[in-house]
Amino acid sequence: MNNEATVAAISTPNAPGGIGIIRISGDDALKIAGKIFVPVSGCPIEKSKGYRAYFGHIYDAGEKIDEGVCLVFRAPNSYTGENVAEISCHGGLFVTKQVLRAALNAGAKAAGPGEFTKRAFLNGKLDLASSESVMALISAAGKAAAGAALNSLEGNLSREIKDCCGKIVTVCASLSAWVDYPDEDIEELKPDEIKSTFAQVKSRLADIVSRYDNGRAVTEGVDTVIIGKPNVGKSTIMNLLTGFDRSIVTDVAGTTRDVIEEKAVLGDIVLRIADTAGIHETDNTVEALGVDLARKRLDRAELILAVFDRSSPLSDEDRQIADMCREKKKIALLNKADLPCESDMAEISRYFDRVVEISAITGEGRDELEKAIADVMMTGEFDPAAACLTGERQRACCVSAIEQLDECINALNNGMTLDAVNVCADGAVNSLLELTGEKASAAVVDEIFSRFCVGK
Ligand code: GDP
């Protein structure tokens, strides 16, 4: 497209690895890459036909800094739609930074967050909905979430939205023709036909929204809190679920004082788990702070895992904890299943959606817990192949289109003029075009890409 500056960034993570990739995109990408990368074949990068890989050496101000491979893509056949060079070098932090510095010294500007994908969007390579799924795919922690993001990236949401939009536009065009050219012999659309089209589109959009709402546990993860009185095994369970030994586990009651948050992947669901200080009365000020944090976190949790020590009888403190979970999705974990049972299962199950016996030490019961969570969060129906929204922005656009289609239908039911119906239908179209990005404002576009990481 464009006469924007040529930009460069490290596209691999900011950590040591086998290979690091520095991506350069813009009109001068090949010229800049040619200044810092010399292929052993002697073929100048700037003259490359594109879709080529070259082995060679990387230089900064004449000094050799590494050897590597340079991939060349010529506009428009690249991720961004611009000329692109991707230099793969050894993946040490120092080396990749040095190669980036060489590219900047040779005339590139440092790319901002999401700048490559933003350029791809501005150059018509991706629409806005697909661009957002790039970030969802990068941050996906499970197979189903990644599958849904990839399907959106490949355009199945955009196709569905464009089809819905097309149906409304066809009605709008007929309405406008009829309203604007009353003297022409244009057949008037029957209100019932218009209503039926709007109702069908509305129901397709409502399906998309409910699929997003129901699948959120898969695509975005579940805010989860582990609660229980001291020493029942919360930290040990947290470690079992996350696979890391990060919480402090001791025999002294009340040792977990801060709220530690970790991600755990159970089947298709990602839990964002807060391991909290046992919620209990305490005179210790530091511990009291932890307890307070835990209560706040409990208020906004979507799922509660309440832990009880199955090897000792239920106490009043246990009962108070069980009582705190009301109005939430909640599972009781009867921990220490490797020890003889002393607690009353029947009493606990009265308070909870599901009860799972588990041993955090042996791992027994982890699979049952996975199934119980999938049941309670109702993720069994999630179909990653179906058109799926990415995030609240897209949801808000869909909901707004649904509301405006509702207004259209009400207007028709109340005998309002077709002109008035047309205004609401136009509003619905605009909401859908905002979703795909065809009518999104520059501020919205900037906001979306600012959430990306640098290098993507
Ligand atoms: P928290 O205070 O609730 O976080 O409890 P911890 O995770 O620190 O565990 C307290 C004690 O119970 C530690 O000695 C753990 O090793 C022990 N523990 C935790 N889970 C189990 C379990 O499933 N079986 C047995 N036998 N001991 C456990």
Image (cartoon, helix red, strand yellow):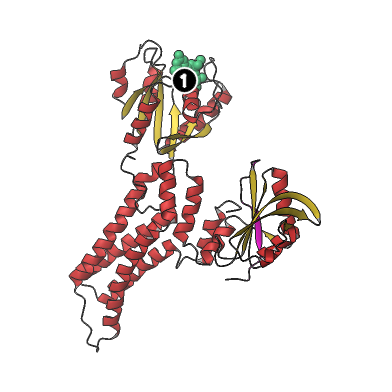
The answer to which of 374 and 445 lies nearer the viewer is 374
Quadrant of the frame with the N terminus:
bottom right
Q: In the displayed structure, would residue 234 be above or below residue 175?
A: above
Residue 352 seen in the current view: no
Q: Main secondary structure of the magenta part?
A: loop
What percent of the width, then of the height, locates residue 440? Answer: 47, 65
How many numbered marks does the figure carry?
1
Instruction: Point out residue 18 in the picture as x, y percentages from the top left corner.
Output: 64, 42
Question: Residue visible at 48% across and 62% down?
Answer: 126
Q: Which residue is mark 1?
A: 233
Q: Residue furthest front?
A: 41
Residue at x 39% of width, y 67% of height: 430
Q: Residue furthest right?
A: 62
Magenta part of the protein: which range? 2-15
Of the pair 41 and 26, the residue shown nearer to us: 41
Q: Quadrant of residue 160?
A: bottom left
User: Residue at image x 47%, y 25%?
Assistant: 240
- In the rendered structure, the answer to whether residue 136 lies left or right of residue 365 reads right
Q: Is residue 346 above or below residue 172?
A: above
> Would you say the beta carbon of the disc 1 residue lies within 8 angstroms of ligand 1?
yes
